[in-house]
Image (spheres, rainbow, N blue to C red):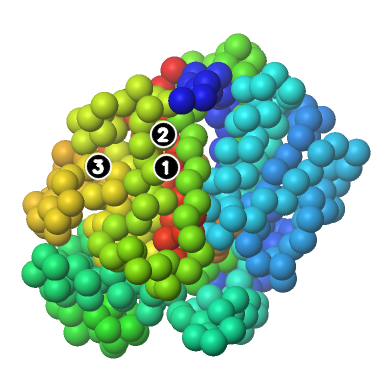
Amino acid sequence: MSESIKDRVAVMGVGCTKFGELWEKDAEDLLVDAVYAAYEDAGVTQDDIEAAWVGIMYPFTGMAGVSLADPLKLYGKPNTRVENFCASGMDAFRNACFSIAAGVYDIVLVCGVEKILDQGSRGLPDLGSSQPVMGDISAPAMFALAATRCFSEYGWNKETLAHVPVKNHHNGAKHPKAHFRKEITKDDVLNAPMIAAPLGRYDCCAVSDGAAALVLSRPDLAKKFNHKDDYVLVKANALAVHTGAPMYKPSFNYIGFPATQDAAKSAYEQAGISNPRKEISFAEVHDCFSITEILNCEDLQFCRKAEGGDFVASGATAVDGELPVNPSGGLKCFGHPIGATGCRMLYEVTKQLQGRADGYQVKNRELGLAHNLGGPGSVCSVTILGQH
């Protein structure tokens, strides 16, 4: 394995906007709000920033580094736009981490933003199909294939899936920045309108607008700023990419995502983790759909294959459970402004580790994991953060 960046990068400060239908703000407004909140949290000014990365997926949100440089007036310094499906924000964080670990920069900015709702579409806006014969497929339809396959292979059903949205809406109801802050019942999930069978309305995350930002530095520098006593260290940062068209790959079985499995394996090696279920304290995972969170738990080795349904049903992933998953409410309650999601997850993990969570505070907070899954399960980023 190549050299790890474990404990060589510190999170100095974080900022995040409220996620939701933010009609009165554009992408520039959201970036400024999130970034200046991160500056204030870290105790830095814009003059301290030596380079910046921004995660954006959609061209209508922004193109090139000017998407960040213009709203911040961060001119004359490297500004880089990163796009990697739904993992865009966390991949931007990955690139920023490497710049610090390599000793190229001392203090850098990483952020993510997406302004989708202004497009007026239902669901995610279509960028066009790359398959000339078969055409495109909606996100709910793609992940409905995974649910149907697991129903057949494992005997799971809609009640199995319902544990995820009920839990996440319970958590999100307490988070002031969440898009949806209302608890739901199992009956609500089971009786909701169908989106892509067997996934109903409450099995699918919504579309939102939002932005999140983080300021990174070397650990020795972090000791001189606001969070000198509770800055957070990067323990691992991994990325894995598989085919962008798994539905045309005969070996893809839809009962797990190889990108997550590979990224998790790499992250655990970097962090020196041998038993994720026991060593990871809590996780923010990509619950774009209820079935995805369950399969994520298996792919991240929180439980064995085929045991994900029982794992979530047991209460192990509740905020007071053995291994809390999405204590913030996840994508289910925040929605999914693509470029912002990964950075928001890292914002949540950082604040949980520092004992200052916006919503529910987990009790055990030594190591936190953030997981982004992009496209039809094609791209995955896994980041592990820990107390210093």
Picture coordinates of residue 64, whole percent (x, y): 79, 55
Looking at the rendered structure, which numbered label has been put on residue 179? none
The span from disc 1 to disc 2 (Cα, nearest Å) is: 6 Å
Check disc 2 and give the amino acid type.
Ala
The residue shown at (43%, 26%) is: 270
Alpha-carbon distance for marks 1 and 3? 12 Å
Q: Nearer the viewer, residue 49 or 245?
A: 245
Q: Quadrant of residue 78?
A: top right
How dense is the environment of label 2, judged by Cα within 10 Å: few (below 14), some, or many (20 and up)? many
Q: Residue 263 bears which disc, if any?
A: 1
Q: Is residue 16 visible?
A: no
In the displayed structure, would residue 359 be above or below residue 104? below
Q: As displayed, is residue 123 above or below residue 253?
A: below
Of the residues shown, which amino acid type is indicated by label 1? Ala
Q: Hey, which residue is sitting farthest front in the picture?
A: 250
Residue 38 appears at what percent x and percent y? 62, 38
The image position of residue 334, as x and y in percent, is: 44, 61
Which residue, given by chain and number where applicable, does mark 2 sit on? 267
Element on which disc 1 rests? helix
* Picture residue at 25% right of the left edge, 62% below the top: 255
Image mark for residue 301: 3
Q: Which residue is pictured at 60% across the width and 31% down the height?
A: 97
Apparent side of residue 291 relative to residue 66 in the rendered image (left or right)? left
Relative depth, front residue between 137 and 285? 137
Name the side, left or right, on which 372 lies relative to 167.
Answer: right
Label located before the other in sequence (1 or 3): 1
| Relative height, residue 328 to residue 264 (above, below) | below
In the image, is 225 to the left or to the right of 72?
Answer: left
Dot 1: few (<14), some (14–19), or many (≥20) neighbours within 10 Å?
A: many
Mark 2 and mark 3: Cα distance apart in space: 12 Å
The answer to whether residue 129 is visible is: yes
